[in-house]
Image (cartoon, rainbow, N blue to C red):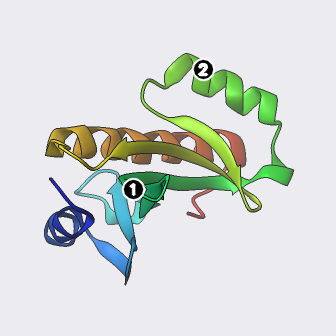
Amino acid sequence: MASWGDLADYIRAEYDVIHDEDEELRVLFTFGDEDEDDDDRTQVVIIVREVLDKMHEWVQIASPCGLASQVNLRDVLEEVGKSTVACGLAIMGEHVVVRHSLPLADLDIHEFTDPLQLLAGTADMLEEQFWGGDGY
C-alpha cells in the first residue's frame, strides 16, 4: 500500500462497506455462528485517512463501544490493559472507542488487516461486556 486510494480500493473490495466518503470508510463486521443468523453480533469500524504534520499519511481505525457516561472507565481500561495487544482506548465525542493508527507509507496489507480484525473483535467484546448490548 502506498496511498489512501490504494487502501480504500482494497477495503471496498474485501469488506462490507456501509459508508463511503472522501477520506472515511465505515465497515460492518459480523460475528457469530454462520448457521444461526439470529444471534449474530455486528461491529461498525471507521477507517479514516489522517495527515500528520501536513505531510505524513496515516490511517486511523476506530470502533465505538458505548457512551462514556454509561460505564466505569477504570474497569474498561483495566480490561483493555489485560486483554489487548494492538489497540488503545479513547473518548471521541461522547463515545468510548477502540483505536489504532498506522502509517500508510510502505504499509503491508497484513499490517492493516490483522489490527483491523483484532480491533473489531475487541470493540465488540468490550461493548458486550461493559455496555451489555450490540448498538454499534
In front: label 1 or label 2: 1
Q: Residue furthest top?
A: 82
Among the two numbered marks 1 and 2 on one chain, the one whose residue lies closer to the N terminus: 1
Q: Residues within 10 Å of mark 2 (few under 14, many from 20)?
A: few
The residue type indicated by label 2 comes to: Gly
Q: Is residue 85 left or right of residue 135?
A: left
Q: Quadrant of residue 111?
A: top left
The vertical placement of 72 against 92, above or below, is above
Residue at 26% across, 45% down: 112
Can residue 42 be seen here? The reply is: no
Estimate the spatial distance between the alpha carbons at disc 1 and disc 2, rounded to whole Å. Answer: 32 Å
Residue at 70% across, 49% down: 131
Query: Percent x, y for residue 22?
Result: 37, 81
Q: Secondary structure at mark 1?
A: loop
**Location of mark 1 (residue):** 55
Which part of the image, by quadrant, shows the C terminus?
Answer: bottom right
Residue at 59% across, 27% down: 80
Query: Percent x, y for residue 135?
Result: 60, 64
Instruction: Determine which of the numbered discs, if any, sits on residue 128 in the image.
Output: none
Q: Residues within 10 Å of mark 1 (few under 14, many from 20)?
A: few
The vertical placement of 105 against 95, above or below, is above
The residue type indicated by label 1 comes to: Met
Can residue 61 be seen here? The reply is: yes
Q: Is residue 118 left or right of residue 73?
A: left
Q: Quadrant of residue 30?
A: bottom left
Front residue of 35/106: it is 106
**Location of mark 2 (residue):** 81
Query: Percent x, y for residue 20?
Result: 36, 81
Q: Secondary structure at mark 2?
A: helix
Query: Percent x, y for residue 35?
Result: 23, 57
Do tag 1 and tag 2 residues touch (Cβ < 8 Å)?
Answer: no
